[in-house]
Structures are given as C-alpha cells and as structure tokens.
Image: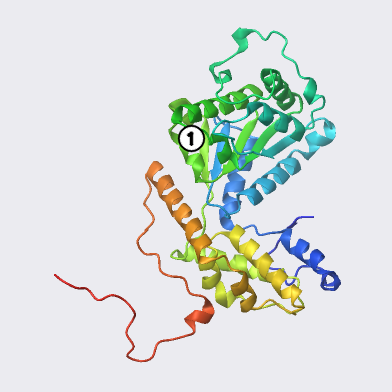
Amino acid sequence: MVKIMNQKQERPFNRNLLKQPTRAKLQDFRDVIVPHRNIQEILDLLLKNAIEPDDASVYLVFGVTGVGKTRLMLEFQKRMVEHFMDELIENPGSLIVGGIEVDSAEGGKFNYSDYYIQVLEALREVLIDYKITYDIDSAEQSDADALLGTFESKNSKALRRAMQKVFINREVRAFTLDEAQHLFDVAGGKQINTQMNWLKSIANKTQTVHVLFGTYELLKCQTVNGQVGRRSEDFHLARYHKNKQADCEEYKKVIITLQRHLPVSSEPNLEKYADYFMEYSLGCVGILKSWWYRSLKNALDDNAKTVELKDFEAKALSSGRRNQIETEAINGENNFAALHNQEYYDLSKIEPEKSPSQKQKSKNVGERDSKRDPVGI
C-alpha cells in the first residue's frame, strides 16, 4: 500500500514495524511518496488537462533519470481513478486510465503490432490473438497509417482498430506511456515525424489524452511539424539546484520527511547533511530515495539502531555514474532552455564533490590551494 507523507507528522509509521523482518521495513520505506513541489506542480496541471482536455491531445513529461517521472505517473493514475470514482461505480466496465512501459526499438525499427498487443493487454482486452482485418476501406486510412516499422502479424491494422475501440468503449480518459523515449528510437527525422503523427492520430480518434513520460530525448518531438507542436504540450520535471535558495529549502523538507519515515528505532539527524545529499543526488528526489533505500538496507543488515553517515557514504553512486547523469541533465536542461528561449544553465563551474567527512579535513594556516599557477603572458 502506497503512503503519502505529511511532513508535520512525527515518526508516522507503526512502531510495530520495528519488530518486523528487514524485508517488511524496506518495503514500507519503498512505498513512501514525498509530495514535493516540482512533482506537485506538474501533477496538478496534468490532472487539470486530463479531466478537462483542451486542444492538446499529447502531453510530454520529461526530465533526467532519477528525477521522479515514474512516481509522478503512478500518482497521476491514482488521482484519475479517485476523481472519476463515481463513474467507475456507475459503469464498472469503464477503465478511466491505463498505461504501459514502452519497449525499446530493435534494430532502429519500432514494432507496432507488439505495441498494440501490449496496450490491449493493459486494457484487459480478450481474444487478442483472433483480431482479423476484414477488408478495411482504404478511405478510412490516414497518412498516419503508412507506418515505418516491423509487424509481427498480418493483422496489425486489425489490432490497431481493436485498440482504438477499447479506448472508446472502456471510456479511457488518459493513457500513460512510461519510458516513452523508446517510441522515437528510430533513425532520421522523417520517422520521428511519422511516430508523432501516428500517436496524435490515435489520441484524436479515441479522444484519449496520451501522456508520455521519458528522458530529454522527448525534446526531439518539439521540432517535428507545426500541427504536432500545436496539439502537444511540454512539462519539464526539473531537478533541484543547489545554487537556488528556494530549491535548497524544498530539498531540505524532503530530507526531513524521509528521515522521519526511516524504520529504525532511533531517528537520525540528517538535516545537517542536506548540502551533501543534494550534491550527491544531483538534486533528483528519485536518486535520493533509492540511495536512502540502499543505505537503510546497509544499516539493517548490520543490526544498527539508526542509519549513520557511513551507511550513506558506502552506498552513494560512484563518481562516474554521477558525472554521466549530471552531463545528461545539463545537456537536457540547456536543450530545453534553447527551445523555450530561456536562460542557459552555467556549465563551466562544476566543482569536485566532497563528502562531509572530506570537508572536515581543513588546510593548515598558510597552505596554498592545489592549482596550476598562470604562466606566460
């Protein structure tokens, strides 16, 4: 059962949890959701657009890995069900919301038949293997039907028609695609254009809002064509930046909230390491949560009564992994800024990371910083 945390609560978990095995404690911590600012703002906008759709039919939610896109998607699905609960009770056959995780393209070609089958399975359709094309009138076929990809069966169009009917008959208001950047793992701008037109066509014909969650690779879709741009909308799930005071304050709230939900007998005082956690998690709450999960397990395996700094230092992401994620984040943020005429992030001032234990080692009086002196003119 997923729990949404209230930051004003003190040790909100059941104290009997401390008597449970490690697996139960870890699962309890995994189920915790932190409703922080960046996710909450986008969640509210997505719900508003899905409940009362405007001219856009496709929404793109993108950010760096570990920023919390999948968690946002799950919360969006949950809130949609809650909002339309009366309709679900009145019509048990309706679904309101569904979703899949998109598989990566093999050999640079997207498999449409497999996609339709996955969607039909997610929407609980039966007799998928018996969908047959019965002389579909060519007049019904749009340019979006001329797809470039692979087809596992001769009945790909029948599968698509069945999928669209399920969207309509089961009253699916919104459909989510996790790892949606895999839709565009194809070579060349022409195929990206085809993919976006294909998806827009499905959304328009079924009147089902499609919400794509993925990496900054989704930015490719912005320059496809004017019509697609008009019928889609972007949502940037940003990470928190240590050079912004408001971001630091919000991140500290996240740390305090997670700290109170650590299922250990003695609550640690981790707020004082907020700068360290923000730097080593790159301002991504998803990375922070996974890191704390590993650190909690490390402490529980040692039968510790609390989680200490050494547990976090032992389970932090390696420097190479952090550098790669940060590079992807900066490149994505700058691409987004360029497309939206915003100010670029500063790429030139990336300082080496230091853990709290390293920062305690101060220099002797009069000792110079280790750096190369300027030479020449």
> x and y percent of residue 86 in the render?
80, 37
- Front-lying residue, 160 or 208: 160
- 112 left or right of 190? right
Type of the residue with mark 1: Cys
Q: Residue at x 65, y 75 (%)?
A: 311
Q: Residue at x 47, y 31 (%)?
A: 229
Residue 304 sits in which quadrant? Answer: bottom right
Q: Quadrant of the N terminus?
A: bottom right
Residue 80 sits in which quadrant? Answer: top right
Q: Is 352 drawn above or below residue 91 in the view shown?
A: below
> x and y percent of residue 262 in the render?
72, 70
For the view shown, which residue lies furthest in the front direction? Answer: 107
Q: Is 304 drawn above or below residue 68 in the view shown?
A: below
Q: How many marks?
A: 1
Q: Residue at x 22, y 73 (%)?
A: 374
> Counting other residues with Cα less than 10 Å from the Cα at mark 1, is it few (<14), some (14-19), or many (20 or more)?
many
Q: Is 182 drawn above or below residue 349 in the view shown?
A: above
Residue 312 sits in which quadrant? Answer: bottom right
- Front-lying residue, 61 or 10: 61
> x and y percent of residue 340 in the render?
40, 43
Label 1: which secondary element: helix
- 55 left or right of 98? left
For disc 1, the marked residue is: 221
- 232 left or right of 292? left
